[in-house]
Amino acid sequence: MQSTAPLIYFSSRSENCHRFVQKLNLQATRIKEDEPLQATQPFVLLCPTYGGGGVKGAVPKAVIQFLNIPEKSPINTRCYCFRKYQFWLCLRA
């Protein structure tokens, strides 16, 4: 699948990021675990992080696979990751 959206995001089964992105009212494309995604325009990447500060498993595998597509390397302009407690701070802001 290809995306021209300015915002690309990953949301786990909890759907927290998905609900957050819906409130932004921006054109956005979701990274899915079973469907490769290729960005064709500059984008901002938004995804949760896991692991409580540990390296292994901190970034979802689907996001790593998305970022490892060589054709997209010069396109990515910003990457925002956050932990659960920071997510709630964003909601309250």
Image (cartoon, helix red, strand yellow):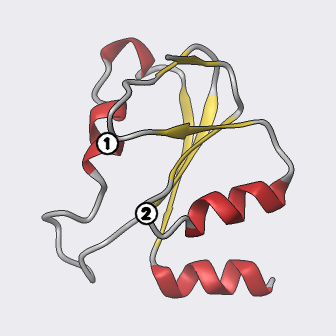
Residue at 41% x, 22% y is 73
Residue 89 sits above or below residue 45 on the image: below
Residue 33 sits above or below residue 54 on the image: above
Residue 60 sits above or below residue 74 on the image: below
Q: Which mark is residue 62?
A: 1
Local SS, label 1? helix
Q: CA distance from mark 1 to mark 2?
A: 13 Å
Local SS, label 2? loop
Q: Is residue 42 left or right of residue 82?
A: right
Q: Is residue 64 left or right of residue 2?
A: left
Camera-near label (1 vs 2) is 2
- Few, some or many C-alpha atoms within 10 Å of disc 1 (few <14, some 14-19, many ≥20)? some
**Farthest residue in the left direction?**
56
Amino acid at pointer 2: Arg
Q: Percent from the top left, x then y, of residue 62?
A: 31, 42
Which of disc 2 and disc 1 is earlier in sequence? Answer: 2
Residue at 76% x, 56% y is 22
**Farthest residue in the right direction?**
25
Amino acid at pointer 1: Ala
User: The C terminus is located in which quarter?
Assistant: bottom right
Q: How many numbered circles are shown? A: 2
Which of the pair 7/30 is nearer the observer? 30
Q: Which mark is residue 4?
A: none
- Few, some or many C-alpha atoms within 10 Å of disc 2 (few <14, some 14-19, many ≥20)? few
Location of residue 32 (image quadrant): top left
Which of the pair 37/82 is nearer the observer? 37
Which of the pair 44/2 is nearer the observer? 2
Residue 91 sits above or below residue 60 on the image: below
Residue under numbered circle 2 = 13
Q: Percent from the top left, x then y, of residue 7?
A: 67, 39
Q: Percent from the top left, x then y, of residue 58?
A: 26, 65
Q: Percent from the top left, x then y, of residue 57?
A: 19, 63
